[in-house]
Image: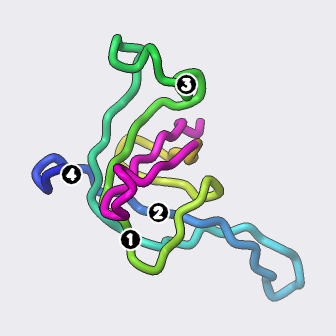
Amino acid sequence: MSFGKMKTFVDLIEKQKVKDLDGFVIETDVILASFRAYYEPIHGSEKWVNRTQLFEATALFRFRSIPNIKITTDMVLICEYGRFEITSLEDVKGKDMYIEVMAKVVV
């Protein structure tokens, strides 16, 4: 994946529960990292027909792995195209260089 294809700016968000001054628990978004990623929408083209996550996933993101951050399916990606929940993630070729994320848009 060349750097030229990574044109979409993405924020990696984690939801954290924090107590406010009155003692109530509030769920807030915390930005863990901001980076560039390759974004590809999934619209049922021939390329995606045989993918198993097709029924849930609406987008594919590929980006370089982020040191000291373990990405999980509890996190959210936010970019100019919307807010996406991570449905699955994979280390591309097992080399810990790039991560491929299948995500669905949050309405």
Taking depth in this image into account, of 77 and 61 the one nearest to the observer is: 61
Element type at marker 2? strand
Q: Earlier in the sequence, mark 3 or mark 4?
A: 4
Taking depth in this image into account, of 49 and 20 the one nearest to the observer is: 49
Callout 4 environment at 10 Å: few (<14), some (14 to 19), or many (20+)? Answer: some
Q: Nearer the viewer, mark 4 or mark 1?
A: 1
Callout 3 environment at 10 Å: few (<14), some (14 to 19), or many (20+)? Answer: few
Q: Residue furthest front?
A: 94
- State if disc 2 and disc 1 touch (CB < 8 Å): yes
Q: CA distance from mark 3 to mark 1?
A: 26 Å
Residue designated by label 3: 52
- State if disc 1 and disc 4 touch (CB < 8 Å): no
Answer above or below: position of 48 versus 22: above
Q: CA distance from mark 3 to mark 2?
A: 24 Å
Residue at figure coordinates x 29%, y 53% from the top left: 37
**What number is the disc on residue 66?**
1
Residue 8 location, x and y as percent?
Answer: 26, 50
Q: Nearer the viewer, mark 1 or mark 2?
A: 1
Q: CA distance from mark 3 to mark 4?
A: 25 Å
Q: Earlier in the sequence, mark 1 or mark 2?
A: 2
Q: CA distance from mark 4 to mark 1?
A: 15 Å
Residue designated by label 2: 12
Residue at figure coordinates x 45%, y 43% from the top left: 82
Quarter residue 3 falls in: bottom left
Element type at marker 1? loop
Residue at figure coordinates x 43%, y 35% from the top left: 59
Taking depth in this image into account, of 15 and 100 the one nearest to the observer is: 100
Residue designated by label 4: 6
Element type at marker 3? loop
Instruction: Point out the stretch of residues depicted in magenta.
Output: 88-107
